[in-house]
Image (cartoon, rainbow, N blue to C red):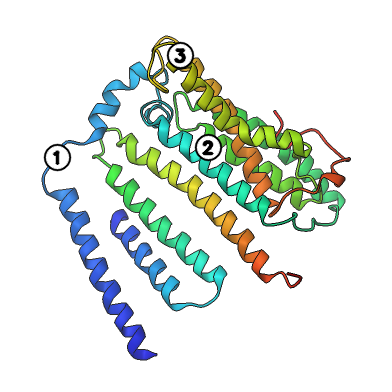
Amino acid sequence: MGVRHSLIIGLLALIGATLAWVYWDALIGHAGTRLAGLALERVPESGVSNPVTAVLLNFRAYDTLLELAVLLAAILGIWSSGPEARGFLPAGPVLGALTSWVVPLLILAAGYLLWVGGHAPGGAFQAGALLGAAGVVLRLSGEPSAGLPPLPWLRVGIGLGVLIFTLTGLALMALGQGFLTYPAASAKWLILMIETAATLSIGATLAAAYLAGEPVPARSTTQQPGGTRP
Amino acid sequence: MYGLGGILLFLLGVWSFLVHDGLLRKLIAINVTGAGVFHVFIAVAYRGLDAAPDPVPHALVLTGIVVAVSATALALTLGQRLERPDD
């Protein structure tokens, strides 16, 4: 056992030294061409002024589309592994009151982050994470549906991001642009539309992933507003 | 410094993944490894105090975090299914 461990430590130290050397070399060595200049230079054409959002939703839109597809694949895998886990008991009055404060605030903050993503740090993923967190809070405080809509609507919500994204790309292709090459005039609104759909989709997916299985349709009678609905 | 910290996290994650038993610990180890990689990316994006950071690695890290979270959720569900006694 001791020999094996020291062997692993030795190997890891070697790998670490190599990585550190490569990192150092890349940092100090020669200033090759980097994408930063190119990306920052073209941000004004992208329809948003936050460079990270511009890269995510415009220059590297394929990445983001496929990332939404990864989320979709993950939730499909989770659903196919069986029914959801059992929920918790309803919360006591203190936690219940706190939840009824926190969840609307989370939804409001998600909307703010979605809008502010155009010109400052923020965007669809942060907003979607907040929506997902709202769902998790609801679920932890005993709301069995985690604020999610009934299953047919939930399916639509989860697919919405990929759907809108792909449809936008195809529509732009039909108009003679490239796939997901936004015309500069309408880029802002297209990006905002895609981000809104992506936010709803990400929020629904994260909250649904927290259920750890496919929702049981029979118990969707106590539907309450909130959670991942706008 | 931040990048070297990232490399250290990466190594700790790999170590933990190789040495420790138990699915949950291995999963946490993989996440630590991923966090190390994100650290390195963010460190690479730094371009001096007076210049804006490189947005491309930032976007990549954002994508990576979401993928990591969804993969973790899937792995946790699969692990839970493995533990279930009835099938």
Q: Amino acid at mark 2?
A: Phe
How far apart are the two marked residues, 2 and 3, measured between alpha carbons? 28 Å
Asked if the residue under mark 1 is in contact with the one under mark 3, i.e. CB atoms within 8 Å, the reply is no
- What is the chain letter for disc 3? A
- What is the chain letter for disc 2? A
Q: Which residue is mark 1?
A: A32
How far apart are the two marked residues, 2 and 1, measured between alpha carbons? 31 Å
How crowded pointer 1 is (Cα within 10 Å; few <14, some 14-19, many 20+) is rated as: few
* Percent position of residue A222, x then y: 88, 40
* Percent position of residue B61, x then y: 40, 44
- What is the chain letter for disc 1? A
How crowded pointer 2 is (Cα within 10 Å; few <14, some 14-19, many 20+) is rated as: many
At horizontal 74% and vertical 54% (from top left) the residue drawn is: A84
At horizontal 71% and vertical 37% (from top left) the residue drawn is: A154
Please tell me whether mark 3 or mark 1 is closer to you in this view. 3
- Total numbered circles: 3
At horizontal 45% and vertical 35% (from top left) the residue drawn is: A64
- SS state under label 2: helix
Q: Amino acid at mark 3?
A: Ala
* Percent position of residue B74, x then y: 58, 55
Q: Which residue is mark 2?
A: A125
Q: Amino acid at mark 1?
A: Gly
Q: Are marks 3 and 1 on the same chain?
A: yes
Is residue A166 visible in the rendered structure shown here?
yes
Is residue A131 visible in the rendered structure shown here?
no
Nearer the observer, B8 or A79: A79
Q: Are marks 2 and 1 on the same chain?
A: yes
Question: Which label belongs to residue A174?
Answer: 3
* B25 left or right of A33 in image: right
